[in-house]
Image (spheres, rainbow, N blue to C red):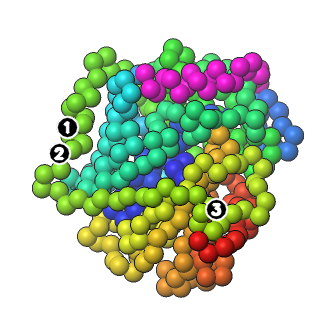
């Protein structure tokens, strides 16, 4: 999932949903033939995959080489949302347009690591720079470094998704720190068509996939880029992040969480709703009290397939309160707690115990 507990002011839940949708499609997920040692019991019959690394490469290459358009449906609990997705693989360029089909008209354009969020009716736009290896449509969350050692990967029965023949991949964790998952790949290309995230009892926590998909034979990359940059008459808010690392910022984990390694860390600028407790309204409607007055540190950890984000900011009683907070939406867990003068938020598509392990082990080591 996108590994942020909320979006910047201006992006709101829609952008989170878009990133969540593609994050879900980036995670091979599984039902298992039987319970793995320490892992959840998920029913089904399957055979071991002899070359998991080759499967990872196939999934990554499919999104980079193919262009397509379709309707993408995300279900989390009682909430179901539909998006219209267009993806163009144009050489080294990856271009996306995602439109909400429900509620307020919102459009997200992505060109490699640049993201534009548009509200046409309000003539408002948000421009963000994002990590090029994070949340790319149809790719694994771990990018080229995706590892599979914390999971057992198996092939399931053939199926059919959105009118396309699909191969089913089953992925089950070797411990209780991550969820079981099930993935459907287009049999011809390897493109990820659908992903389910399952709890320890095999119940679907979140499902995201195409209900309709067609291949684009002559992709119009320049048309999408022209739409993306047509911001005349729009009120534009631009944001930027600064690359850093936990040690440089004076933080670290007292003990590693098994299987997870830090992927990167960034500082979000103050006053732009970067932090985990921010609102989700277009900028004109956001209040100053909902925005952090100082920078927010974000560190992203990955086990190669699933990510967890830790957000660190100065504690503000009016925004955070004082009691520990926890919430869940679909597979996404969020945990917020106070640590001295700081407020820590952990978020990810993992069991709550995993977030508790991260939050409890994060410690202040020095003042940078």
Locate residue 306: give its quadrant: top right
**Residue occupying the far right of the picture:** 37
Q: Nearer the viewer, residue 202 or 152?
A: 152
x, y percentage for residue 269?
41, 66
At x 75% / y 54%, what residue is drawn? 257
**Residue occupying the far top of the picture:** 188
Q: Which of marks 2 and 3 precedes in the sequence?
A: 2
Assign the magenta stretch its main secondary structure: helix
**In the image, is residue 93 above or below residue 117?**
above
Locate residue 167: give its quadrant: top right
Would you name the residue on which mark 3 appears? 247
**Magenta segment, which residues?**
45-65
Residue 319: in magenta span = no
Q: CA distance from mark 1 to mark 3?
A: 41 Å
Contact (Cβ within 8 Å) of mark 1 with mark 2? yes
**In the image, is residue 242 above or below residue 29?**
below
Other-residue count near label 3 (Cα within 10 Å), few / some / many at <14 / 14–19 / ≥20? some
Would you name the residue on which mark 1 appears? 226
Contact (Cβ within 8 Å) of mark 3 with mark 2? no
State the count of labels: 3
């Amino acid at each position: 999932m996108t590994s942020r507990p909320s979006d910047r002011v201006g992006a709101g839940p829609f952008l989170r949903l878009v990133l969540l949708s593609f994050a879900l499609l980036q995670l091979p997920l599984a039902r298992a033939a039987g319970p793995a040692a320490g892992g959840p019991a998920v029913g089904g019959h399957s055979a071991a995959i002899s070359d998991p690394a080759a499967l990872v490469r196939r999934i990554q290459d499919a999104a980079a080489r193919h262009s397509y358009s379709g309707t993408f449906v995300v279900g989390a609990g009682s909430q179901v949302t539909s998006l219209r997705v267009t993806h163009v693989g144009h050489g080294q360029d990856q271009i996306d347009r995602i439109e909400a089909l429900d509620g307020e008209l919102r459009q997200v354009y992505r060109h490699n690591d640049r993201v534009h969020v548009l509200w046409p009716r309000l003539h408002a736009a948000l421009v963000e720079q994002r990590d090029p290896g994070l949340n790319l449509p149809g790719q694994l969350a771990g990018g080229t470094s995706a590892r599979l050692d914390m999971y057992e990967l198996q092939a399931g029965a053939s199926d059919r998704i959105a009118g396309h023949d699909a191969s089913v991949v089953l992925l089950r964790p070797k411990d209780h720190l991550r969820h079981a998952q099930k993935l459907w790949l287009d049999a011809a290309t390897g493109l990820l068509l659908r992903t389910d995230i399952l709890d320890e009892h095999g119940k679907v926590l979140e499902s995201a996939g195409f209900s309709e998909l067609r291949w684009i034979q002559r992709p119009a990359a320049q048309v999408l880029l022209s739409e993306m940059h047509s911001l005349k008459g729009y009120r534009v808010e631009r944001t930027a992040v600064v690359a850093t690392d936990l040690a440089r910022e004076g933080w670290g984990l007292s003990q590693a969480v098994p299987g997870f390694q830090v992927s990167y860390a960034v500082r979000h600028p103050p006053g732009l709703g970067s932090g985990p407790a921010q609102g989700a309204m277009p900028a004109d409607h956001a209040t100053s009290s909902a925005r952090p007055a100082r920078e927010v540190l974000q560190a992203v950890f990955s086990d190669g397939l699933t990510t967890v984000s830790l957000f660190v900011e100065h504690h503000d009683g009016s925004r955070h309160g004082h009691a520990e907070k926890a919430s869940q939406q679909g597979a996404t867990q969020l945990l917020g707690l106070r640590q001295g003068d700081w407020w820590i938020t952990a978020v990810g598509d993992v069991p709550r115990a995993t977030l508790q392990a991260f939050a409890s082990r994060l410690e202040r080591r020095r003042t940078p």
